[in-house]
Amino acid sequence: MRTIHKFTLDIVKEMKDVYRIHLSTGSVFLCVMVQNNVPQIWIETDNDKPANQPVDFYIVGTGHPLPENINSNDYCGSFIILNDGFVGHVYFKEPFSQQKTRDEKGEQINESKTLVS
């Protein structure tokens, strides 16, 4: 059964650059948002598959250098917390792949990031 799960990136409580979660193959990244002043990521997963794929999410502050092992294709989204005092940008590292959906005219209508094995 496919469900949506929320994962906390609580950088205020525990500041770290990399957050590791385990997901099932075929999981789809949905979005980054702030809830109660804490950044969260939402991911669609298949509960019938084991969550045994480690995925690292990186948080990079505005003006800070990007880690050498990530690039612009790894970008997930940005968030603002601490009364606009911190802007964070979330990146993931492989094994997600980008998939683009196009309409009959070839125009892009959707883009998703799906976990592959």
Image (cartoon, rainbow, N blue to C red):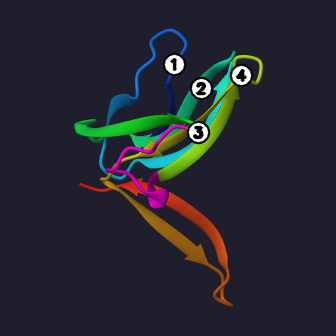
Residue 93: give x, y in percent of width and height: 35, 48
Q: CA distance from mark 4 to mark 3?
A: 13 Å
Instruction: Identify the mark nearer the N-term, 2 or 3.
Output: 2
Q: CA distance from mark 2 to mark 4?
A: 14 Å
Label 2 with label 1: CB-CB less than 8 Å: yes
Query: Which of the pair 53/14 is nearer the observer?
Result: 14
Q: Mark 1 is on which residue type?
A: Ile
Q: Mark 4 is on which residue type?
A: Gly
| Residue 24 placement: quadrant | top left
Q: Residues within 10 Å of mark 2 (few under 14, many from 20)?
A: many
Is 85 within the magenta?
A: no
Above-or-below relation of 74 to 58: below
Q: Residue at x 44, y 45 (%)?
A: 66
Q: Residue at x 52, y 59 (%)?
A: 112
Residue under label 1: 11
Residue under label 4: 85
Instruction: Identify the mark nearer the N-term, 2 or 4.
Output: 2
- Indicate which label's residue lies in the foreground, 2 or 4: 4
Q: Residue at x 34, y 31 (%)?
A: 21
